[in-house]
Amino acid sequence: MTDNDKTKQRQQLHDRGICVVIPTYNNGGTIAAVVGDALKECCDVIVVNDGSTDDTSRILHSIENITIVEYGRNRGKGYALKHGFKRALQMGFAYAITLDGDGQHYPSDIPLFLKANQQHPGALIIGSRNLDGINLSKGSSFANKFSNFWFCIQTGHRLPDTQTGYRLYPIKKLYGLSLLTSRYEAELELLVFASWHGVELVPIDINVYYPPREQRVSHFRPGKDFARISVLNTVLCILAVVYGLPLRLFRWAGTIFRTIYSILFMSFFCFCVINPAVWLYLKIGKMTEQKCRNLHKIIYYSLRFVMLKHGIPGTTFTYKISKKADFSKPSVFICNHQSHFDLACQLIFTPNVIFLTNDWVWNNPFYGMMIRHAEYYPVADGIDALMPKLQSLVKRGYSIALYPEGHRSRNGRIGRFHQGAFHIARQLGLDVTPMYLYGTRRILPPKTYHLKKGPMYIEVGDPIASSELAKMGDTMAQASQMRRHYIEKYETMANRIEQDV
């Protein structure tokens, strides 16, 4: 990885609200190297000195650009994590990557946690150690298997490594933090409570280093700590019945409710936009210019009612409009494409817009007639063949909207931009108005009709004048440059929004 890549990674971690928390107790021989390596990966490092009696404190205070939390006597790893998380929250972070100060974990694996966080925002990411070929003590090996077994009993979920300390926590979503036990067993407790409350748990493979047994510094006390873990598991098993199980049943009921609601909402959505009165209005009499205008207003006000007034339970819908945006004059609207919900988000801004659609939308048995009467056109006809129709629409005051990607994103990333939108803007002398959309893919994933929870956000950017587009080069260069812009803009939106999902 180049220095530029490292700089970009550090900035990504910061922008997503991710810091590193390192609890340490008497790790004077390794802590400087661990913290130094962590700083190479992440610019926000919090070290919790858990009452060390060696030279750990002196070493930490000699390291620049870190935040130190320390107190007089050793209180245990759980206590250290709790205070590290509290400091991270005070500093405005949303996530904390925890790793041990004894050199067991490789800070170079931090990019793996960043990638997992981008793919699973809001999840608790667990670094699963590959322990094959490592000479673990019988106590450590048994403790891991023992912990994995009881975790499965208490939560109904299986994890390959519940004892690992290398994790990414969504610290705004941690449950039971005030009740957290003070020592090693606290990490199991955090996992159990997160699972009970429906936090997604995502294991990823990480590297691990164990020095020769005679060189290891361990603060694990087999007798006392096994006793504490056994007591904790007994308490958690009781809580699993009286607290965890009801929560899981409540979530299952919620899933059934959302499935039923999805059906009812889709019916409500269709009734608002494609109700029998509108169907009769379109069928009776000749389709006139005024009738077409009225149809666009019906779609516009219906969607504003659904999206802004009624809302979708479990979701939040917000938007932002640039002060320079002007919906009163024709423009070419472009937007990234994520879901069937995209049109509903875009059509709340103005009734004077025509969408270019795919063939299946044009021929849809439920709303195809309305699409055709609204003068939406299929892109399969070809841009050049459509140009006279588009020119006529623009003269009548309509904007033209289309998705440069051509189809919904298959993986959530911004796909390749086609040249059609920029060709239309050049031929008709129109500005390009960018719209940036986030979250509809999570609300309505591809190949599903089950509405899920989450935020939806759309932003209308500054219009780009045709003269500014011309400076980018030909339409191919314009498409390529705008795609890069969309990738950066989407990452910025995701980094901000996903700190609170």
Image: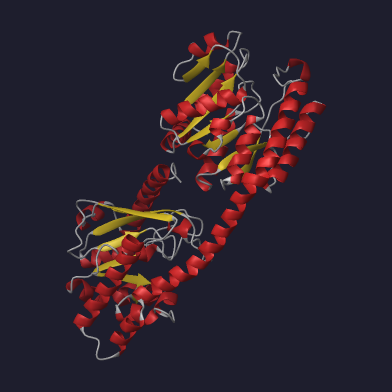
Residue at position x 30%, y 85% in the image: 282
- Please determine whether, in this image, residue 451 is positioned above or below residue 131: below
Query: Does residue 136 appear in the picture of this structure?
Result: no
- Please determine whether, in this image, residue 394 is positioned above or below residue 52: below
Residue at position x 35%, y 49% in the image: 485
Counting the numbered discs, the total is: 0
Residue 275 picture location, percent across and down: 36, 79
* Among the 4 quarters of the image, the one containing residue 100: top right
Left or right: where 150 falls relative to 457: right
* Among the 4 quarters of the image, the one containing residue 168: top right
Left or right: where 60 falls relative to 461: right
In this view, the residue in front, 93 or 397, is 93
In this view, the residue in front, 328 or 121, is 121
Residue 280 picture location, percent across and down: 32, 87
What colouring style does the render use? secondary structure
Furthest-front residue in this view = 242
Residue 259 picture location, percent across and down: 53, 65
In this view, the residue in front, 313 or 122, is 313
Residue at position x 63%, y 30% in the image: 186
* Among the 4 quarters of the image, the one containing residue 276: bottom left
Residue 228 picture location, percent across and down: 71, 27
